[in-house]
Image (tube, grey):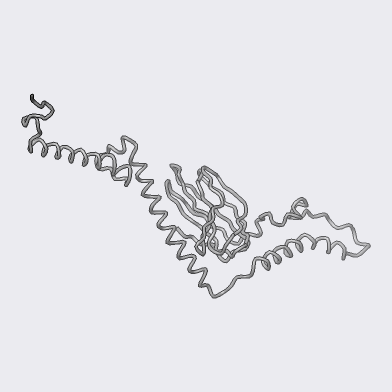
Amino acid sequence: MYNTDYPDRADLPTSARLIRSTIIAGICSVVILITIVLPSEYGIDPTRVGSLLGLTPMGEIKVQLAQEATAQAKATVTATDEVQTASVTPPSPAVIELERRIAALEALVSPVQQAAQAPAVAAAPEVVPLEVPMDQVADVERPQPSVWRDEVSFTLTPGQGTEYKMVMAAGAIASYEFAVDGGVINYDAHGEGAGQKASYEQARGVVGDTGQLQAPFEGTHGWFFRNRGTADVVVTLRTGGDYAELRKLI
C-alpha cells in the first residue's frame, strides 16, 4: 500500500525558483515603497505616481504637521522658562482690572461733572454724544479700540502658519480681535505653562474673531493661525488687557 500524501521531489521548488521568488518580492517591495509609502508618509514622490494617486499632498501635510509640533514644543519650553525666571513681577490682575474700571467710569462721568459745575445763568450746554453708548455703560468688559495694547499685521502664504501668544498670569483676562484680508484662515486658541495645557477654541475658514481669554494658569496663551487657501492673506491681530507681553513663537 503506497502513501500518496508525500509530493514527488520533482514537484518541490528548486533553489533557483526560491531565489527568483525572493528577488521578485524584493522588487515589488521597493516599487511599493517608492510609489506608495514615500509619497503618503513623507511627501517624497520621485516617480510622480503619488501625485497622480493623491498621496503626495497627504504626505506633505504629515511632514508639515510634525515639524510644527516640534517647533511649537520647543517654543513652549522656552516661553515657560522665561516666564518662570522673570525678575519683574507684573501688576496683579485685580489691580489692572480696578484701574481699567476707574478710567472707564471717569470717562463717562466727566461730561456730567462739567455740566453740574457750570453757572446757573449760563445757557444750556450743548449735548455731546458719549463715545461709549449708554447700553454699554455697565458692560465695561467689552473690548473697545482705546484698550488695545498691541496691534500686529502679518502675511500668510498658502499653507503657511504662525503663532502669537500672550504671557499671562493665572486668572488674568485679555481681550482680542483679529481680521483677515484676502481670504479666510484656520486657527487654534490654546495655552501652555508649568507643565499644563489648555484648549480654548478651534475654527476653520473664518474671516475674523473677537472675544476674551482667561488664563487658568501662568504661561503663554494665544493662537496658531494657518492659511489653507490658495492665495496670500493679511491678518491683523489686536490685543489688550492683563498680560505681560505679546510674543511671536512660530
Quadrant occupied by the N terminus: top left
Q: Where is residue 68 in the image (x, y as percent from the top left)?
A: 41, 54
Q: Position of residue 133 (x, y in %)?
A: 75, 52
Quadrant occupied by the C terminus: bottom left
Q: Which residue is drawn at 78% across and 52% down?
A: 134
Q: In this view, does 41 lie above or below 2?
A: below
Which is nearer the eye, 136 or 83? 83
Q: In this view, does 248 lie to the left or right of 137?
A: left
Q: In this view, does 84 lie to the left or right of 104?
A: left
Residue 100 location, quadrant: bottom right
Q: Is residue 186 above or below residue 6?
A: below
Which is nearer the eye, 170 or 186? 170
Q: Is residue 140 left or right of residue 216?
A: right
Q: Is residue 105 left or right of residue 160?
A: right
Q: Position of residue 104 (x, y in %)?
A: 73, 61
Q: Position of residue 88 (x, y in %)?
A: 56, 74
